[in-house]
Structures are given as structure tokens and as C-alpha cells.
Amino acid sequence: MSVEATTGEAWGDISPDAARRLVIAAVQAFAERGYHATTTRDIAGRAGMSPAALYIHYKTKEELLYQISKVGHLRSLAMLSEARDADGSAAERLESAVRAFVRWHAEHHTTGRVVQYELGALAPEHHAEIVALRRQSEDAIRTIIKDGVTAGEFDVPEVSGTTLAVLSLCIDVARWFNPGGRRTPDEVGALYADLVLRMVRPTA
């Protein structure tokens, strides 16, 4: 298990401590076993708590997934919006956005797998809320690419399709990243930022 999943660094804003421990345990369990194969007993046991204690903080297993998804998507939106609104050229802003987004998915790869690939298990009202956050994140990248096209920095055949391709590249890092591998999160972020800029810049 990665340091990211065991330290709970990504969940410092959740309180009290018992609620935070349950979220960390749920991330571990969902990433290892999948949402549907995980039971509330599994989660409680990982947190060192009884199943009854879990329900004091979260009414259902789905509510835990929603908490994880919401925190992850809000952080994604914040970093992408910051890049969109920054000073600089479209290329500089797109590089910053991709570098940060990829680095987060590498550093928090366990959380990222749950946030990005268990969306279909959310209840309809929660699913709609998370999809709205995802669309805002897409819009942040789409805006940067549009700005680049308008300024003549980028040459892409179709902005919306290119936006989805860029986001898919970034998100998929959570699926394969190995903290014991030869590249650090920063190095993967730099590599992907370079690849994305090569995708959108005019060819000579």
C-alpha cells in the first residue's frame, strides 16, 4: 500500500478523526477490491472500528464513496481553474494545468482510481453533482485550449475532442502509476505536459 493511502494526507480537512480514518480505509478497500465487492465491515475493520461505529459518521457505503469523490473532484477543479485563470500564454497555462493534474493523480494514485473509476456506483443525486464538477473541470481545460486556438498558439481539429483526450491522458496515470517505478510524480507530470503541448501546437 502506498504512503499516500496510509497517511491520509489528502483527507486532512475531514473531521473528526474517526470520520477521516473511515474515509482512508474506504479508499484503500475500494481501490483494492472495487466498490461493489467491499462491505462496510471491511471498511470498519481497516479503520480499527466496529461496523456499528461506521454508521455514526456515514449512513451508507455510498455516502463514503460520495465523500471521496467530492473531495477529489473539488481538488481537481481547483487546480485546473487556477491554471486557467493564471497569467501567461495559453501554452504556459496548459502546461501548468497538465503538470499539476498528472502529478496529483500520480501522488494520489490510490485515491485517483476510486475518484475516477467508481463514479457509476454513486446514487443518482450524488452522481449528478459529481458529473457537474467534472464538466467544470473539462470547461477549464477547454477554455485554455480555445484561448490557444484564438491566439494562434494551438492548431487542433476539434476543441471538445482534444479536451477529452487531454483529460483522459492525465486521469489514466492513476491506473498505472507505481511509486516504486523509475519516474517520480514530478517527472511524469513534466513528461505529460510536454506530450500535450506537442499534441496541440501547430506542426512545422
Image (spheres, rainbow, N blue to C red):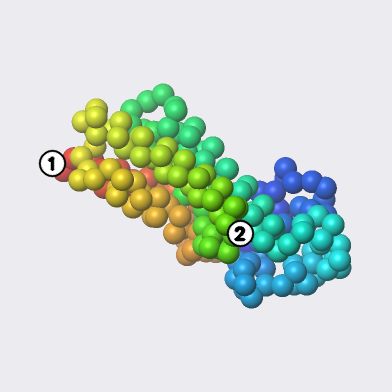
Pinpoint residue 85: horizontal percent, then vertical percent.
44, 28
> Looking at the image, is mark 2 or mark 1 earlier in the sequence?
2
Query: Of residues 142 and 189, which is closer to you in this image?
Result: 142
- Are the two marked residues, 2 and 1, in contact with CB atoms closer than 8 angstroms? no
SS for callout 2: loop
Left or right of residue 173, residue 64 in this image: right
SS for callout 1: loop
Left or right of residue 180, residue 48 in this image: right
Pinpoint residue 204: horizontal percent, then vertical percent.
13, 41
Residue mark closest to the camera, 2 vs 1: 2
Image quadrant holding the N terminus, namely bottom right
Whether residue 122 is visible here, answered yes or no, is: yes
Neighbour tally class for label 2: few under 14, some 14-19, many 20 plus, Cα within 10 Å:
few
Report which residue position mark 1 lands on. Answer: 204
Left or right of residue 193, residue 129 in this image: right
Outermost residue, bottom side: 37
Query: Of residues 204 and 64, which is closer to you in this image?
Result: 64
Q: Residue at x 67, y 72 (%)?
A: 38
